[in-house]
Structures are given as C-alpha cells and as structure tokens.
Image (cartoon, helix red, strand yellow):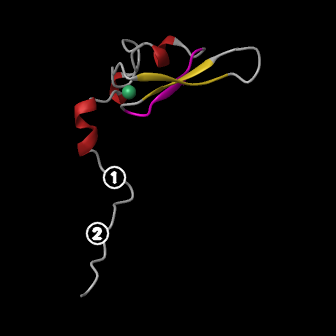
Amino acid sequence: MICPRCDSKNVDLLTKAPVDDAWEVYICETCCFSWRSTESDDIKDPEKYDKRFKIDSSKISSLDKIPPIPELIKKKD
Ligand SMILES: [Zn+2]
C-alpha cells in the first residue's frame, strides 16, 4: 500500500472497526496521514488525491513548526 499524500510505502494498519471488521484505518509512518479503508478514491488513491495537498517526504523536515520550540535554558555554573 502507498500513502496517498506523500507516496511513501511506509504504511501501517492503525486500527480496525470495533464491530464486524467493517473497515480498517491505515496510517503513513512518514507523514502521519491516516485514512479509512472505506473512503473514496480521491482520498485513498495517490493518483487522485488533491495535488495541492500532497507532500514531498524529503521536505517534511523543512516545514514550519507550530508553535516554535524555545531554546533550552542554560544553567549557570
Ligand atoms: Zn504519507
């Protein structure tokens, strides 16, 4: 399986429906995108997923962090 948002193959089964195995939820270990197995192709299919919201996995580390992480306080000797 391939992540629809970042095209990573690092996809895991996150959970299953509590009743009747009605669906499964998958999660991408690379970009944290998760989706349910019963969702439509524009969510599940990497080709049909809205290109404006796709992510290049190599650029994740350069994304803004919200909120910013403050500097560690340095102890005085
Ligand atoms: Zn992903």
Residues shaded magenta: 31-37
The answer to which quarter of the image holds residue 18 is: top right
Residue matched to label 1: 65
**How far separated are the C-alphas under marks 2 and 1?**
14 Å
Considering every residue shown, the one lying at the far right of the view is: 19
- Counting every numbered tag in the picture gives 2
Left or right for 42, reference 16: left
x 28%, y 45%: residue: 63
In-front residue for pair 76/66:
76
In the rendered image, residue 5, in percent from the top left (x then y), is placed at: 38, 24
In the rendered image, residue 71, in percent from the top left (x then y), is placed at: 28, 69
Mark 2 is surrounded, within 10 Å at the Cα level, by few (under 14), some (14 to 19) or many (20 or more) other residues, namely few
In the rendered image, residue 66, in percent from the top left (x then y), is placed at: 38, 55
Does the stretch in magenta take in 35? yes
CB contact under 8 Å: marks 2 and 1: no
Residue matched to label 2: 71
Q: Which quadrant is home to the C terminus?
A: bottom left
- Earlier sequence position, callout 2 versus callout 1: 1
Left or right for 56, reference 48: left
Task: Point out the quarter of the image occupied by ligand 1.
Answer: top left
Question: Mark 2: which secondary structure?
Answer: loop
Amino acid type shown at disc 1 = Lys
Asked if residue 72 is positioned above or below residue 40 in the image, the reply reads below
Left or right for 4, reference 64: right
Mark nearest the camera among 2 and 1 is 2
x 69%, y 22%: residue: 17
In-front residue for pair 76/43:
76
In-front residue for pair 21/68:
21
